[in-house]
Image: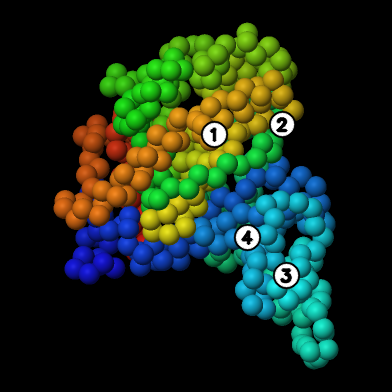
Amino acid sequence: MEHGLPTQWDQLIQPGMVHGSLYRDEMIFKEELEKIWFKTWVYVGHVSETPDANDFVTKHIGPMPVIMIRNRRGEIELLLNRCPHRGNAVCVLDKGNRATFTCPYHSWTFANDGTLINYAFPEGYAGTDKSRLGLSKVPRVSIYRGFVFASMAAEGPSLLDHLGGARRTLDQVCDNSPTGELDLTAGFLRHKAKANWKFILENECDGYHPAFVHSSIFSVSDSAIGSLYGNDAVAVTRSFGHGHTEVDPRPEFRRRDAPMSWFGTTAERLPEYTAQMIAAYGEERARQIMIDGMPHVMIFPNLFIAEIQIFVIQPVLATESIQHVTAIQFKDSSEINRRLRQQTMGSVGPAGFLLADDTEMYERNQRGLEIKSPEFLYLKRGEHRERRDEDGFLIGHSTDDLPSREIWKHYRALMEA
């Protein structure tokens, strides 16, 4: 904790206000890793990234590297990417297909279920029980609609309990696929930000900034997205509890009553995809899905689904984070997938506008916290107009600070536990 600052969570996190040290203090960051990243459910990857036996991809739980692998039995497992000998990474590739992994330091070799097969010059280990020297596994792995989550805690709430009402948004994503499945194989972009991971977490469902921060891209692309975040918008923000939040634009899309308007096009311009949807769901259900479109949801602490993209937040240091971004792709839907990739590159690719705008804001915010007064950030916009929806979830105007307040409420509960 920084010298002279309050040490109690009720002092750092007050109604509608949070202390600046929560975004910059390394001791707080280390405590977050233990109480959030290494305890709760964290999104790791998608089953489509490892379709065949022995396929693997390297991922992270917080800053900790893991290997997500489909074993010989076709099951998804997560191995900690650390040799038990001297701590070296046993896998340095992003992805591949391997039955074994060999540590490059001293050539210890492991089966892809983590079992130690052998080591170099084995006579030096006479009498050693190799069964005690395998790669460690993530204690709990659970999958919902193809989304792979992990928890380093051996016991705790189930994934379904953790997701709660936010499951509807994952269902919504999959329902937009004619097969009900995703195929996340377009590859990932990595964007580093010199900012605390919680600035990114809060920004994802902050509907107050787009009209200003993203005004240039909205004007160039003639996008109707900006209207979702205006003062007269009918879109809402929502808290599902457990830190999960969304900006729900469906009220606006339903008012337009035009399939695919959420995607900036019409159903007529995507005839193959439209035909696939009708064949899969029937005309009425398909039409409603194509009107409602994709969600804009932040699954605490690290999975952000931004309509056409998936972002995975990785904390590195108290003042550094990485966002891993990929285009959403629907299984066996080449027509719309091409458009999804193109729009993703235009918004978050190396020459894209959208993420560059946001990253500039994250980093400016982080630098601003070096100024010690005022000590607290003010998050009270819209407190007076919070209300419950028909399912009992707290909602507010699309430009309100409701998502941030609810994130910090859940954060405090985890940190005080």
Comes first in the chain, label 4 or label 1: 4
Residue at 41% of width from left, 66% of height from top? 30
- 382 or 215, which lies in front? 215
> Which residue is under mark 3?
103
The answer to whether residue 253 is left or right of residue 65 is: left
Mark 1–mark 3 Cα distance, whole angstroms, equals: 34 Å
Q: Which of marks 2 and 4 is nearer the N terminus?
A: 4
Marks 3 and 2: in contact by CB < 8 Å?
Answer: no
Residue occupied by mark 2: 331
Disc 3 is placed on an element classified as: loop
Which residue in the protein does label 4 denote?
A: 66
Q: How is the image coloured?
A: rainbow
Categorize mark 2 by other alpha carbons within 10 Å: few (<14), some (14-19), many (20+): some
Q: How far apart are marks 2 and 4 (CA)?
A: 26 Å
**Please, what secondary structure does the residue beneath circle 1 have?**
loop
Q: Which residue matches tag 1?
A: 349
Q: Where is residue 32 in the image (x, y as percent from the top left)?
A: 41, 62
- Please name the amino acid that badge 1 sits on: Gly
Per the image, label 2 sits on a secondary structure element best described as loop
Task: Name the residue at 57% across, 56% down.
Answer: 60
Contact between labelled residues 1 and 4, with CB atoms less than 8 Å apart = no
C-alpha gap between disc 3 and disc 4: 14 Å
